Image (cartoon, rainbow, N blue to C red):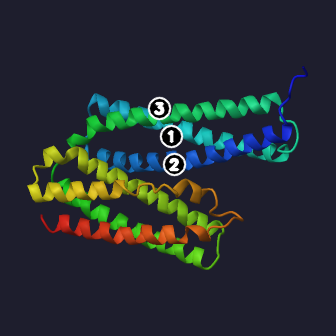
Amino acid sequence: MAERRANPVSIGMTAMRELDKAKIRVVEQNDVLKAAEQFLATARQEMILLDENGTILEEKYNTVRQMINNFETGINRLNEPLNTHQYSIISRQLEEEKNMLLEKSSEICLILSEINVLLRLVLPNIPREKLLEIMDELMSLVSDIEETASSVLAAIRDHCNDSMTLEKTGKWGELTGKVYWTLTAIHLNLPSFNLSIIQNNLIHNLITHINSFYMPRWWVAFLEVVGKEKDVESFWSKVYKYRDELKVLTEQVEAILGYD
């Protein structure tokens, strides 16, 4: 019986799909890291990273930052030859380079998980008086997200799916990552903040609410079409609903700030 060989066109298209998924992964990993980066900047200013956990955290952050940069560079380097050869035979070297790149992505995810564990050890050192400052920052972030989501909505409405729309979507993802991280910081510190029952309940409701739409289930599918010559209009109602949920989120933050 003759051995069946894989269709070279199929191999090429599979490699392209894997690379497209890797690009989305870079966006997600960068969002997580930017949020951690913002925390680290605050932590350095507050002088709360002087213990061993803080030192390890800084080292792991610097390592994964470089890994993500290298990952992004590798994707860009592979993009051109894969585009060129997507309908012909891909060399073994190109296939191996692509597989090694995807393995690096898994390593990055593992280190990001380790960073999350370390942050749980460092975060309780944030003083209680920082709570209102954090909440004010959260309010500002939510406002920025609402404004950015509105601009993306306007672009979809005007059938404008260009690089500017892609840039706005990137900003949207980055801001949402910061909101999620800010809420994580608050949640981990609740026992040390010595808040009233009302304040605790309000914050728990806030965290539950934002967890329900970070990131929305349709987010990755949206990233695959935004800024490209593809249909984004089908996402209009989803983005509209998401923006409306932000108004509820704003009201919840205001309620917490009102119970100082």
Whether 2 is drawn above or below 200: the answer is above
Check disc 1 and report its element: helix, strand or loop.
Answer: helix
226 vs 3, left or right, is left
Residue 65's label in the rendered image is 1
The residue lying at 84 percent from left, 42 percent from top is 9
Which residue is under mark 3? Answer: 110
Residue type, numbered disc 2? Glu
The residue lying at 66 percent from left, 30 percent from top is 100
Q: Quadrant of residue 131?
A: bottom left
Residue located farthest toward the bottom when viewing the structure as drawn: 158
Estimate how packed mark 1 is, as few (under 14), some (14 to 19) or many (20 or more) residues with alpha carbons within 10 Å: some
Q: Position of residue 232 (x, y in %)?
A: 62, 67
Q: Earlier in the sequence, mark 1 or mark 3?
A: 1
Check disc 2 and report its element: helix, strand or loop.
Answer: helix
The residue lying at 87 percent from left, 23 percent from top is 3
Q: CA distance from mark 1 to mark 3?
A: 13 Å
Q: CA distance from mark 3 to mark 2?
A: 14 Å
Q: Quadrant of residue 189?
A: top left
Residue located farthest toward the top when viewing the structure as drawn: 1
Q: Quadrant of residue 103?
A: top right
The one of 183 and 38 positioned closer to us in this rendering? 183
Q: Earlier in the sequence, mark 2 or mark 1?
A: 2
Check disc 3 and report its element: helix, strand or loop.
Answer: helix
Q: Position of residue 234 (x, y in %)?
A: 59, 68
Estimate how packed mark 3 is, as few (under 14), some (14 to 19) or many (20 or more) residues with alpha carbons within 10 Å: few
Q: How many numbered markers are drawn?
A: 3
Looking at the image, is mark 2 or mark 1 nearer the viewer?
2
Which residue is under mark 2? Answer: 28
Residue type, numbered disc 3? Leu
Location of the N terminus (image quadrant): top right
Residue type, numbered disc 1? Arg
Location of the C terminus (image quadrant): bottom left
